Amino acid sequence: MSQFRRGDRWVAKFQFEGRQVWVPGGPWRTKAEARHAEEVHRDRLARGSKHETCAEFAARWLREWPREAVSTRRLYSRAARSFSDHFGETVLSEVDRPAARSWAMGVPRNLSKAIAAMYEDARDVGLVKANPFSGLRLPRRVRTRVAPPSPEELDLLLGACSTLGVYGPEFRALIEFCAWTGLRSSEVQALRWSDVEDDRVWVRRARKDDGAYGPPKNGRERVVPFLGRARVLHRVPRRAGCDLVFHTPRRLPLSKGTLHYHWQAVRDGSGTSSSRQISGVRPIRFHDLRHFCATALLEEGASHFDVSVMLGHEDGGALVMSRYGHPSKDAARRRLLAIGQIRQPPSGSRRLDRVTA
């Protein structure tokens, strides 16, 4: 047996069938708790718990290997449920790579990655010898086609805000602000008046699904140029005692559920979904306002790097290039012609290569 300190807690490990096994469920407050957990796990392995079913281990994995972040625990719970529904009574160690790959091909990639993490934990404690979900080389999935609202559709959405009554002007300002800053839903929920300056907007935090406030998606703050068409915050009333910019109709901090509830009402009132359905294009999501921002800036001549700075990407514009390319060839031709006009020599001027002595 081997129990030892890690900080002010205790962990345990031991040798089983020639390999080191860490005892799950720790760290523990006392050495006695760590010793007891080691005895239980050693006994489990000795009694053949390597015959534990997929459903049994998935449930135990959620209990004994809990992740810190609420969003991660929620994702892993979804993955464990989907995995258990498919493999059920199959012995955990009997899932081979073909079966793993077949299941992974039919579920979202983040679920299969979660189960790969589960099998890695099972391997660490000696329940399986190999992880059948590692290195599956799944085919790259084609991204859903970007379908931002057109300028005409954006106007329809803004007009439909009147269906929200007295809350309409504030929600209209929220839509316009996001359409010309590219902020994510979680970021605009956490925006504070102290983040808004004369010519820039600081994106310092985001509201998480559990209601807590934390860093933006990539963990980094960014500064967004405060474009003229985004300067609509004068239509948003300030709430006494709260620095948040946007609120619910009841003057509470804006949440994901409230935002999307009113977004759907506006979208339904705009009539944009029916015309999109005829064209085979999905209805406009709130996140598509971010795509509108990127597309509009590209149309007006911004570079892919410029747009990546606006959106908070750290890849120098590679993702913007792959997702949007040049959305309009006509706009590209107009920009090229404008460059040509700027560089065209004045009428009647002589070219140097024609000057003779």
Image: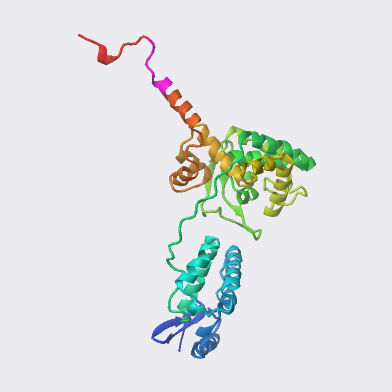
Report the residue that reaches farthest toward the left.
357
Query: Can residue 169 be seen in the rendering of this structure?
Result: no
Q: Is residue 212 above or below residue 18?
A: above
| Residue 115 screen position, x and y as percent | 52, 69
Name the quarter where the C terminus is drawn.
Answer: top left
Q: Residue at x 34, y 11 (%)?
A: 349
At x 51% / y 63%, what residue is drawn?
105
x and y, in percent, of residue 347 in the image: 39, 11
Q: Give left or right: position of 28 versus 245.
A: left
Q: Does the magenta portion include 228?
A: no
Nearer to us in this view, 351 or 8: 351
Give the answer, above or below, for where 85 lies relative to 38: above
Q: Find the residue positioned furthest to the right.
A: 165
Left or right position of 249 against 213: right
Is residue 166 depicted above or below 61 in this figure? above
The quarter of the displayed image where residue 134 is located:
bottom left
Whole-percent x, y for residue 38 in the image = 51, 86
How many circles with numbers are drawn on the protein?
0
Quadrant location of residue 75? bottom right
| Image spot of residue 263 (x, y percent) | 70, 46
Model colouring:
rainbow
Tell me the quadrant of the picture where the N terminus can be found.
bottom left
Q: Nearer the viewer, residue 105 or 223?
A: 105
Q: Which residues are magenta?
A: 340-347
| Most foreground residue, 167 or 160 | 160
Residue at (43, 79) in percent of width and height:
129
Q: Is residue 235 visible?
A: yes
